[in-house]
Amino acid sequence: MIVSIIYLVLSFILDGFMSNIFSSTLTDISYFTTIYIIISLVIIYPYFGNERKYYFLAIVFGLLFDILYTGTFVFNLVLFMVIGIVIKLLNNIFPFNVFTINVISVIAISSYHILSFIILSLVSSVSYDFVLLINIIVHSILMTIIYTSISYFVMKFIYGKFNVKQIK
């Protein structure tokens, strides 16, 4: 489990680091932006036999994401929990390989943005355009696939090296 936590922490830090390097505005979205912590939740899920620990990590990192990156409270905690459930359902459908993990990552990132868009549109006084949502999703696909593919092979190697089948 320590490997998964280290990977989650590195992905969490990468979220902040990449947003500072490749800063984006609503009108100029970088192709190098994605939500790395959600991708890491996709990558580590198949290694967890104990879903409680997995969801606990999703909740903790959702709360940290809220506090450190978005300035909201409970918003991302709930979203990360919902995305964790989506990841679980997709992992029950798809086999574990690099292609399907990329598909799951793109679906998870898209789900996060769509859910955020819906919630913010309902509760916020600021109006968000549907074209903006599509732009954000399209611009995040490239980095999502790159980071997912690299992470898949690195984590598969690390877990294979330590002969870890599942975290209980």
Image (spheres, rainbow, N blue to C red):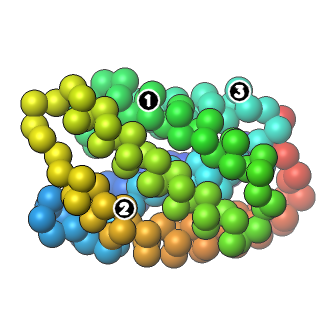
Q: Amino acid at mark 3?
A: Arg
Residue designated by label 3? 52
Which quadrant of the structure image shows residue 31? bottom left
| Label 3 element class | helix
Looking at the image, tell me whether mark 2 or mark 1 is earlier in sequence order. Answer: 1
Q: Locate residue 21 relative to residue 91 in the image: left or right.
A: left
**Structural crowding at the residue carrying mark 1, measured as other residues with C-alpha within 10 Å and reported as few (<14), some (14–19) or many (≥20):** many
Q: Residue at x 46, y 54 (%)?
A: 109
Determine whether 21 is above or below 129 in the image.
below
Q: Locate residue 92 relative to residue 43 in the image: left or right.
A: right
Q: Residue at x 78, y 61 (%)?
A: 96
Q: Amino acid at mark 1?
A: Leu
Instruction: Give the Cα distance between marks 2 and 1.
Output: 20 Å
Residue designated by label 1? 77
Looking at the image, tell me whether mark 1 or mark 3 is earlier in sequence order. Answer: 3
Name the quadrant of the N terminus: top right
**Structural crowding at the residue carrying mark 2, measured as other residues with C-alpha within 10 Å and reported as few (<14), some (14–19) or many (≥20):** many
